[in-house]
Amino acid sequence: MKVFLFYLAPLLLFLWCSQVCVVQGRLLSISTKPDPNDAVATARWLVSFNFWGVLSTISTDFDGAPFGNVVSFSDGLPNQGIGIPYFYLTTLDPTARHALQDGRASFTVSEYPLGTCGKIDPENPTCSKITLTGKLKLVDEKSEEAEFSRNALFSKHSEMRDWPEDHDFQFFKLEIEKIFLIDWFGGPKPITVDQYLHPKMNNHAFIL
């Protein structure tokens, strides 16, 4: 029975996304590093292929100072990201407490952990990095989105399944409002949230 559910879960997630994720973020599979001229594909590639990043919130513990925290995340099943980062957080950690008080947040990931920057420094503009800014929201635990976030996160971070129940971990997501992407020289690339969430077909991406 467990084996059957293991193979059935991705299919159910895909069917659910075909109905629901269209309004949030289009499913996207990107196999290789996109061309720097394709900013949207680069942005989605960075978020889809990364496993962790720095989530920054407005601290309620340090007089409103910015507080950055390394967190694991997922935007969907492997190679089937929808562009929206989901997190599994506990209020025993400051980040979740901050978000429940003040949802303003930003999330940054870098290309460097993916191993495609070669020997250049992570701060080099050709080593891509993206910051998504918006509101960190608690996902309704009784919603279909909670099941999506569970499958998305646990498929990439299997250890999460065994994290202590008495720590009251909950699913959060970042509702994206602004995007800051550097993937080459010349400053940040202009990308709207709509362009990011609903990319067009190109040479590097296959939209499911």
Image: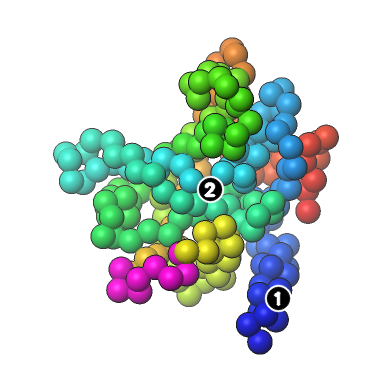
Amino acid type, callout 1 = Leu
**Is residue 174 part of the magenta span, yes or no?**
no
- 1 or 2: tag closer to the N-terminus: 1
Q: Position of residue 2 (x, y in %)?
A: 63, 82
Q: Which residue is mark 1?
A: 8
Magenta span: predominant SS is helix
- Crowding near the residue tagged with mark 2, few <14, some 14–19, many ≥20 C-alpha atoms within 10 Å: some
Amino acid type, callout 2 = Phe
| Coloration of the structure image | rainbow
Q: Read off the magenta span.
A: 160-167
- Is disc 2 placed on a helix, strand or loop? loop
Whether residue 145 is visible to the viewer of this picture, yes or no, is no
| Residue located at (50% from left, 37% from top) | 109
Q: Position of residue 24 (x, y in %)?
A: 61, 53
- Crowding near the residue tagged with mark 1, few <14, some 14–19, many ≥20 C-alpha atoms within 10 Å: few
| Residue located at (32% from left, 55% from top) | 96
Count the marks: how many? 2
